Image (tube, coloured by chain):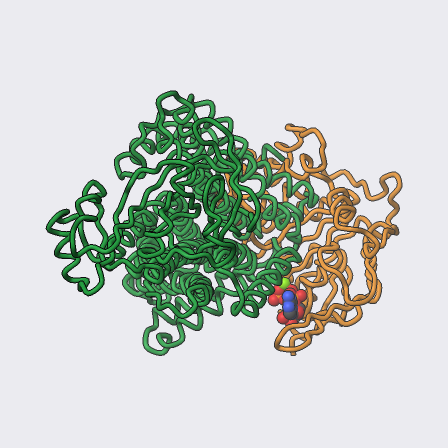
Amino acid sequence: MTVQQATAPGSTGTDVAVTLDGLTRSYRSKAGRVDALRGITHAFRSGTFTAIMGPSGSGKSTLLQLAAGLDEPTSGRVLIGGIPLGGLDQTELTKLRRDTMGFVFQAYNLLDALTAFDNVALPARLAGQRVDRAAVHDALARVGLRELARRRPPELSGGQQQRVAIARALHVRPQVLFADEPTGALDRHSGRVVLDLLRTTADQGQTVVMVTHDPLAASYADEVLFLADGMVVGRLRDADAAQIATAMSELEQ
Amino acid sequence: MFHVSRQSVRASWPAYAGAFVALTFGIALIAVTATLIGAVETTGTRAGVSSAERLQLDDLSSMFGVMSGVSLFMAIFVVASTFGFVVATRQRELGLLRLIGATPRQVRRLLLGEAALVALAATVAGCLVGTALGPVALWALRAIGVTSVHLVAPPAWIAWVSAAPSGVLVALLGCRRASKRAAKVPPTAALREASLERRRPGVPAILTGALTAAAMVGTLVLAGQLSLLAAVMVAVFLPALMVAALTSLGPLVVPPVAALLARPFVERSVAARLAAGELRTAVRTTSSVAAPVTAIAAMAGSLLLTLSFTVDWSSGQDRAQFAAPVVVTDPSVAARLAADPAVGVVDVRRTVSLPVGDGDTEDVDVVDLATAAAARRLRADDGSLADLHGRTVAVAHTYLTDAGVHLGGKVTTRIDGKRVRLRIVAVVPDAPDLYGNLLVTPGLVTGAPTQLFLTPRSGVSDHRLLRAAQALAGGAAMTRDAWIDGVTADARRANNLGLLVVLGPAGLYAGIAIVNATLIGAAQRRRQLRLVGLLGATPDQVRRTALWQAGLTTGAGLLLGGTTAGYVGWLMRQAITRDLAGHPAAMTIPWLPLLGVAGTCVGLALVAALAAVGVRRRANAHSVA
Ligand SMILES: Nc1ncnc2c1ncn2[C@@H]1O[C@H](COP(=O)(O)OP(=O)(O)OP(=O)(O)O)[C@@H](O)[C@H]1O
Ligand SMILES: [Mg+2]
């Protein structure tokens, strides 16, 4: 399971998985204009694990949504594997997302109507692929939920639901995995399991982008990106939890 | 996607239970209607059915036609609003599907699949219920006196053949808009905590709204010139148009109206304040509860007012034409009355049923021109009554427009099995209860006497004439006014029965929709209301909030529907006053049925709201225990 595949065919360590090019995003509301992002340029390289940190309201979730093509930038471009998202229609975008991206969010990740197994298998079904039952069970086993495959989300704890969502994201082996505070609802142990999984995923050549408030979680990443007021205000490479915490508290002053 | 469809329906069946019930009743209604129309057809073609019964069956047939039209209309729009509701409350789930890779088309197919499942179940259930209710309905029609003909039910497959496709059609039409809207749910909907229920209306909604506004302005501008027939047409179509517009623009229109109603109470009651807040945020619930209320209030109100005013109009016409002060309803005493010294003219009303045009049967008056002129002021507005002899006919004004004929034209009929063409030689004023649409002279056919209209010999008072008539005919002799009052009361009773048949099913349906929307809405807001409870609201406050919400929403619906009905009534009134040209006409507003409709709507919504609170509290108690 821990075989290093960073140099798998066709993906060298310097390939760029996601490119953000001068991204801005403004929301117009009755209360006036909010500049959630004010010019972000960054390249997420393939096979890397990046954590995004910053105070509440700094634009982290907005950044994630733009990078995944869930929302359109006010100006600037997003490229996934060299393809600009701006030129795609809804169906093309969906297909690209289906083929290349996985998602884990802080809450409400699952369809209540489906069992854990069916939730994990759904993306493959949507893509019209045959469901590999063994692979689905394997994905559930990796997050420690082999026994709960037949339960529905309302019958699972918050942390268990979160792990089902991660199993789903891992099952399709997406090129890029986006996670918004995936460990927010988990206890220390489950949190570590999840972070280890994300780490392994990146080591196997997939790209992980994770928003978090927790310096310990961020320390699993190769690089930490600090956002404040919609701009990148700092970067740390291979930092430990203490260094990240110091950087955060400096930022919040 | 069908796999997911099936799972969704299984997992959240309460939301679909609403759609299922609505659809089942729609299909059952159509099946019952088909049974009734089939029964009229089967029974009518049987030997031994007299022409009077044939006439009655024809009337019944067209009444059932109207009934099924109204029910179908109600069914489509209630199912649409139920499915729309289901979609609106599943934004987050649909967004999640899109997020993990469902294309808009796949989401749409998911919804259509769910609709197909619900439609399938509802069609089976509806056909069975309809088949069971068919004979009951036939029996009820005789029991409440709508018809005296013994109706025989047609084979059951006739009802199924017409109800099943209608059910599928209604489900598809109902789900079409909802599934389109579902396909438009963005993936980011999965990430939003509470879906802010804000909807921009689509192009069709705006077009319907514009069309309705144009119709309102148009009729308002023309109000001074609208003929009676045109006014009746407006009364039938405007409410339907209005309902369609309010259904598609409901989320925009209803909440502000409800908020306006809430304003006086918000300062005084915290429950009212909470309810007003809910009305504004839960836009979907608000408009879904209000929509059926508006629909039934507008349609029932317009029909009630229109029919009542029509009776006012005919009694006004009768009075304007009536010269004879005394009426005798027993024609056998005609000869003896003629010999009485107090009596001047005995005008015998004679009628005969003749087939006219293509198959319709009409009551034709056979008139003695001299006595009719004296007692019923029979005169020609156009043409000349002097020409009325042999193969000629005089027609009443409204018949010209109704049948699309003109002075000098021909009316085709059959007399003694022979085809006869009658030339129209005169147009006479309307007097619906004094003579019918068509008048001929005794040379052509013989009619059966029905009433006698008496005028006094000169110098004899009306009172003495009445006494003389009563001496011979007893209770069958009465004053002109008493007779008109009786005829009018009969007409109103017949109208009310007819309305019951036409609107009964639609009303039942609207009731289901009101309860349905209230219950689904309450179920969706369970979490919010639990929060309100945590914040310190007592169970009583929660209950009163629910009641306020139901009351305000229904009130808004009634206000919108009532305004529509009121406007239609006003148009009718204008046309009637003009048509009577100066003759006074009573204005009878049927308050009792109108208030009955309004009260039933409010009552149903309140009971449903209370039931929802009760269920919720029991569920909470259960989960705590
Ligand atoms: N739909 C919206 N309309 C208006 N403003 C918005 C909207 N969504 C986000 N914002 C604003 O944009 C800014 C960035 O929001 P974002 O959700 O990206 O913050 P965040 O960094 O994820 O915060 P948190 O850590 O609290 O999740 C905030 O000021 C927020 O208020
Ligand atoms: Mg966020």
> Residue B464's image quarter?
bottom left
Q: Which chain does green denote in the image? A: B
Q: How many marks?
A: 0
Q: Residue at x 61, y 56 (%)?
A: B191
Question: Where ligand 1 lies, by image quadrant?
Answer: bottom right
Residue B259 image point, x, y percent: 44, 71
Q: Residue at x 31, y 50 (%)?
A: B491
Q: Is residue A184 visible?
A: yes
Q: Does residue A25 sit above or below A88 in this rendering? A: below
Residue A213 image point, x, y percent: 62, 63
Q: Is residue A250 shown left or right of residue B581?
A: right
* Chain A, colour shown: orange
Residue B294 image point, x, y percent: 44, 58
Q: Is residue B527 shown left or right of residue A9?
A: left
> Residue A245's image quarter?
bottom right
Q: Is residue B178 shown left or right of residue A128?
A: left
Q: Does residue B286 sit above or below B471 in this rendering? A: below
In the current view of this chain or complex, which residue is farthest to the left?
B471
Closer to the camera in the image, A96 or B274 = B274
Residue B248 image point, x, y percent: 56, 56
Q: Residue at x 49, y 54 (%)?
A: B384
Location of the N terminus of chain A by quadrant is top right
Location of the C terminus of chain A by quadrant is bottom right
Closer to the camera in the image, B262 or B546 = B262
Closer to the camera in the image, B284 or B321 = B321
Q: Is residue B488 shown left or right of residue A3?
A: left
Closer to the camera in the image, A58 or B278 = B278
Q: Is residue B20 visible?
A: no
